[in-house]
Amino acid sequence: MTLVTESLLSELRALLGPAQVICAGDALETLSKDFYWYSPVLRRQLEDKRAEAIIRPATVEETRQAVAACCRARVPVVPRGAGTGNYGQCIPLYGGVVIDLSRLDRILSLDDGVARVEPGVRLGAIETAARAIGWELRCMPSTWVKCTVGGFLCGGSGGIGSITWGGTNSPGNVKAVTLLTCEESPRLIRLEEQDCLRALHTYGTTGLMVEVELRLAPKVDYEQLIFSGGNWDRLLDWTDAAARHGTWRKRLVTQFEWPIPSFFKPLRKYLPANEHSTFLLLDRAQADEAAASAVAAGLAVVFRQPLPDPPKPPFITDYTWNHTTLWAIKSDPAYTYLQSGFGQNFREQFAELRRRFPGEILFHLEWTAGNAKMLRGHAAALNPDAVVVGGIPLVCFRSEERLREILQCCADIGVFIANPHTCFLEEGGRHPNIADKRALKDEVDPAGLLNPGKMKTYAHNPFGAPANA
Ligand SMILES: Cc1cc2nc3c(=O)[nH]c(=O)nc-3n(C[C@H](O)[C@H](O)[C@H](O)COP(=O)(O)OP(=O)(O)OC[C@H]3O[C@@H](n4cnc5c(N)ncnc54)[C@H](O)[C@@H]3O)c2cc1C
């Protein structure tokens, strides 16, 4: 189906300049896709999907006029940041126009612990600018060097820093967002505080985020530490206690089951064969104490290096969160993954998964502060009971049917899965407020043009139900 006409293309070229309207070639393909291929299911479903045109506005005003033109032409409009999403979030299901917002990349202000930025700013740029004046991001994905803030709020959920500050949807982390509506005369709508939750993690279906205000955290100087041990349970006990430690200022607590460490090529010289490992980002002032505690627990400290300020690689974060899956797939393309949240009975849940699927699941765990409550701009004293064990276990893919069995088993034993093998919003995460999100979509996208098909429970889709629904 061709939806984008020559007349719309001419209008967009006149508005943005011909170089900022891409209709063919490798760039069209690349900018139509994200990291959906982590999932063999999505690879099959989305491989042939692409935009008819990619446009690259540089200002909010250009974006407004481009959206107005697309609305008049009634074509799908799919926002895009850096395209590092994993769920096929920014892959258009019906063609149309992808709006690459990465040129809207100005940091507008960094005052009083709040970063006010355009949506295409890379989180790495905010982190560097914030650290220079005594602040840092509260939470960021492991793609922080490259990904955009708009993409993180609309597609991501949390990551580094979430052990202390929770995720994007934890109260207070996002102060305000400004949305551009998808209408013939687009409007700007500002949402504040809790109201922002309606627009977070909605895959670009509820307006184009054109400005963001993020609360920052006071900067900490971190030490990057890796611990190793041959006994999984002993390492798990220590790591879990470290994650729940009431006074250690942590930014990352991650544990890997062997052979996952063997996938981290650049780190191989540090990581002993057949041993599991724990990665920790901790206040440098507390690193000696943590190292001594690990040694006393029978673990080895195999890597220790300050995180440079301003940030400069190597970053141990490059091996954590969903980077782990990337290293695994590079090592063996048969790996895929799950995004999971375990209960306080996580040890039993691991045992049951190992019993049911021996050799098929490798544990990669990430600890976070559940829905962390913030007090006066500071992380609440960590309540050990609020810390949750989640993670991104690797799965040796056998078949889609087997994957469904694993997902079913997780559901049966109370393991929450944000299913990364679907591109539909509601199936890929927890959306207790989906009715609010649908209502916001009604308000900002009356013609149903924004990333159509992704919000599956939104009744008005002018392009018909998606083929894979
Ligand atoms: C190696 C790897 C590691 C990752 N680790 C993490 C992690 O630790 N934590 C995590 O949460 N995620 C993680 N992800 C997923 C992804 O990197 C993050 O969600 C990232 O923040 C997405 O940013 P982006 O700029 O690439 O967004 P994109 O992929 O470009 O877009 C994501 C979604 O947001 C929408 N969108 C983008 N910009 C806007 C805008 N301005 N207005 C409205 N909608 C918009 C798009 O339509 C799309 O639906 C990882 C992915 C990879 C490949």
Image (cartoon, rainbow, N blue to C red):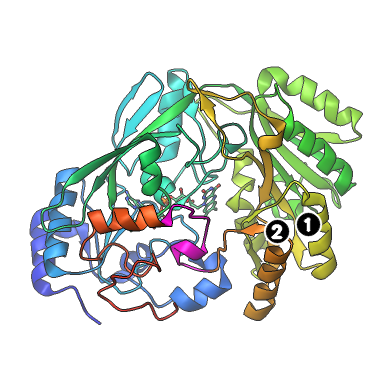
Q: Which amino acid, mark 2? A: Gly
Please name the residue that numbered disc 1 is placed on: 349
Looking at marks 1 and 2 on the same chain, the residue that comes earlier in the sequence is marked by: 1
Please check the rendered image and state whether residue 184 is part of the magenta-colored stretch, yes or no. Answer: no
Above or below 212: residue 12: below
Q: From this view, report whether residue 24 is shown above or below residue 81.
A: below
Q: Quadrant of residue 407?
A: bottom right
Residue 334: quarter of image: bottom right
Q: Which residue is mark 2?
A: 414
Q: Position of residue 69 (x, y in %)?
A: 12, 61
Residue at horizontal 81%, vertical 48%? 276
Quarter of the picture holding the N terminus: bottom left
| Tag nearer the camera, 1 or 2 | 2
Neighbour class for label 2 at 10 Å: few (<14), some, many (≥20)? some
Range shown magenta = 422-434
CA gap, disc 1 and disc 2: 8 Å
Within 10 Å of the Cα at label 1, are there few (<14), some (14-19), or many (20+) other Cα atoms?
Answer: some
Residue 220: give x, y in percent of width and height.
Answer: 57, 21
Identity, as a three-letter code, of the amino acid under mark 1:
Gln
Q: How many marks?
A: 2
Secondary structure mostly seen in magenta is loop
Observer-nearest residue: 48 or 382? 382
Instruction: In the rendered view, tell whether residue 394 sits above or below residue 94.
Output: above
Residue 96 place in picture, x, y as percent: 25, 70
Q: Position of residue 13 (x, y in %)?
A: 12, 60
